[in-house]
Image: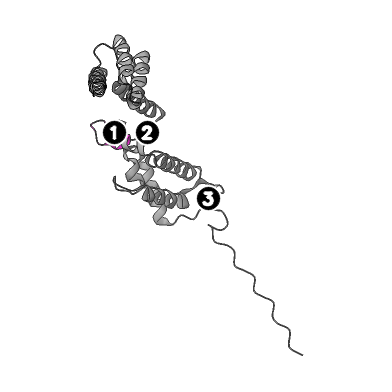
Amino acid sequence: MAPPRPPAASAPPPPPAAAGGPALSPEQLVDLESRCAKLDQTDYFELLGLERTAAPGDIKKAFYKESRVYHPDRFFQLESKALKDQVNELYKRVTEAYYVLRDDTKRKKYLSDIAGPDRAQKLRFTDASESETKAAAKKEQEEQIGTHPKGRQFYTQAQKDLESGNPSAAERNLKMALTYEPSNARYKEALAEAQKQTADKSKGDSSFKIR
């Protein structure tokens, strides 16, 4: 009969990370302190350790790397309120950076902002700056196809007329568009093109009848 086996040794207690507590090394604590101290002078690329030419995949990797270390859920048992606040503030800014940089339009606007003379005031992409971006995009679009709603409506219809091979209808709609915006250069150019196509079409029809 085999001798009884000794009882298995009890498993060691889990490390702080597995137990749900903080797992910041002394180096990381220094890093956290340093980064929080200069958050107001750091742009989103610097915050995520990225070049300004970073690809979307690199932006995502950088965000997940920061999230693994500084996600607030890892520090819910922490007694130090000051440290908790630092973690929360850093993670909030990291999330904000990812929200902006992952979006092509926001990233382009942000790059322009931080490269300009007002960099210090443009480091954070606020709701106000997003509204400004949308307003600028709307203004750019209006400048391209007109500022008056009725003018844009007739111009848009004229474009459809030209695409369907009906330049005479396009000509009428463009003349209507110009009654709302007499100085719109785009409308004038489109009208000249419509008139040219109408004339060419008339010549072609006349030539066909003569034959």
**Residue type beneath disc 2:** Phe
Q: Residue 147, can we see it?
A: no
Going from the N terminus, do you reach mark 2 or mark 1 first?
1
**Secondary structure mainly formed by the magenta segment:** helix
Q: Are marks 1 and 3 in contact (CB under 8 Å)?
A: no
Label 1 to label 3, Cα distance in Å?
34 Å
Question: Where residue 47 sits in the image (x, y, percent)?
Answer: 35, 45
Question: Where residue 86 sits in the image (x, y, percent)?
Answer: 44, 43
Count every numbered label the image shows and give the total.
3
Q: Residue at x 42, y 56 (%)?
A: 26
Residue for badge 1: 113
Q: Nearer the viewer, residue 41 or 159?
A: 159
Question: Where residue 126 sits in the image (x, y, percent)?
Answer: 39, 31
Tell which residue pokes out farthest to the bottom in this image: 1
Which tag is nearer the camera, tag 1 or tag 3?
A: 1
Tell which residue pokes out farthest to the front in this image: 211
Q: Secondary structure at mark 3?
A: helix
Residue for badge 2: 125
Residue for badge 3: 74
- 184 lies above or below 60: above
- 72 lies above or below 175: below
Splitting the image into 4 quarters, where does residue 16 fall?
Answer: bottom right
**Residue type beneath disc 3:** Arg
Going from the N terminus, do you reach mark 1 or mark 3 first?
3
Instruction: Judge the density around disc 3: few (<14), some (14-19), many (≥20) Cα neighbours within 10 Å.
Output: many
- Quadrant, the C terminus: top left
Q: What's the magenta region?
A: 109-120
Tell which residue pokes out farthest to the top in this image: 179
Label 2 to label 1, Cα distance in Å?
9 Å
